[in-house]
Amino acid sequence: MVLHEVIEAFRLIDAPDASGEPVAREIERRWDRVDVVVETSKGEKGTTDFLKVIIPGSKGKTQGGGAPTLGLIGRLGGVGARPKQIGAVSDADGAIVAIASAFKLADMGCKGDLLQGDVIITTHICPNAPTRPHKPAPMMASPVDTKTALGLEVTEEMDAILSVDTTKGNDVINHKGFAISPTVKEGYILKVSQDLLNVMKAVTGRPPVTLSITTQDITPYGNGISHINSIMQPSTVTDSPVVGVATTAELVVAGIATGANYPLELDATTRFCIEVAKYFGLDLCQFYDKEEFNKIKGLYGSMKRLQTLGGRRSK
């Protein structure tokens, strides 16, 4: 159970003066071997604190080992939309899951339950982020541009990435809980990972739920094309496989809505991320079939152009 950690994470981000430092101090209090960095980034629409947490694994790269490193990114525009909205917004789910995962993994490490691989967790905390019109429901925007955010969220050390993002403001998926996307790598939308589906089944005790994504969704923001949201944006800046972990609802819920962070569903989402981290460090959870990926590239060539703004815009 990580419901306690979810509630603690929510309490820290649900304040008009929420920032990265109190979260960093709480993580460090739990385990002194965790490396936590807070970097404040300023954009045209305000500032936000980016949080980077490195949980060392017993055989991880930080210890000179060769176990693979999992990246866990809490994607969002902001945890709050003050002064337009009072309180944490639905869009805060990604940050809550990332922070709660850091709390739990730090607690585990302090007690001696070390994962084999390192886990790198990134997210950002902004209690007064801007909003933007969107159909079928308004969405949160970010105080900094997407390129800046991704530069602070995605690192070269991440061998695979779970990108957690609120995905409730649409009619594409009608399920309260969470869903996972197909794996995206180098511009290819690959089949859904069976290993991740198996983890999801164990965590929820229910049939797994998947999120439909399109070619549009895996292209960079700024190309004038519609995206379901920013959940797949990390795939535009890395060659590592990326899977979206979407927190979802049965009907359309605006990203700027308050009172819309569902604790039991966030508990399940956080447990899923932690279980994936356990198996991935043991090399027992594959995000994609390497042999099949090489075959599809051999047949159809590189699709990396989908990671760019494309055409004349990329020149």
Image (tube, rainbow, N blue to C red):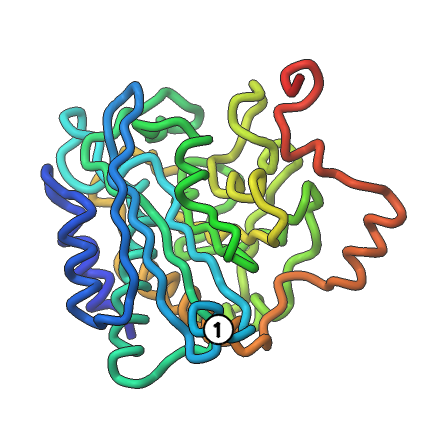
Q: Position of residue 33 (x, y in %)?
A: 27, 71
Query: Position of 238 compared to 276: left or right?
Result: right
Q: Residue, x 27% and y 25% (percent of image)? A: 130
68 shown above or below 87 = below
Q: Residue, x 52% and y 39% (percent of image)? A: 233
Q: Position of residue 116 (x, y in %)?
A: 46, 78
Q: Residue, x 27% and y 27% (percent of image)? A: 42
Q: Secondary structure beneath disc 1?
A: loop
Indicate the quadrant containing the N terminus: top left, top right, bottom left or bottom right: bottom left
Residue most extreme to the top = 312
224 shown above or below 215 = above
Query: Position of 11 compared to 265: left or right?
Result: left
Residue, disc 1: 64
Q: Amino acid at mark 1?
A: Gly
Q: Nearer the viewer, residue 31 or 207?
A: 31
Q: Visible in this render: residue 205?
A: no
Q: Position of residue 160 (x, y in %)?
A: 55, 58
Indicate the quadrant containing the C terminus: top left, top right, bottom left or bottom right: top right
Q: Position of residue 84 (x, y in %)?
A: 17, 25
Q: Nearer the viewer, residue 303 or 134?
A: 303
Q: Nearer the viewer, residue 154 or 126?
A: 154
The crowding category of the residue bearing disc 1, from other C-alpha atoms within 10 Å (few below 14, some 14 to 19, many at least 20), is: few
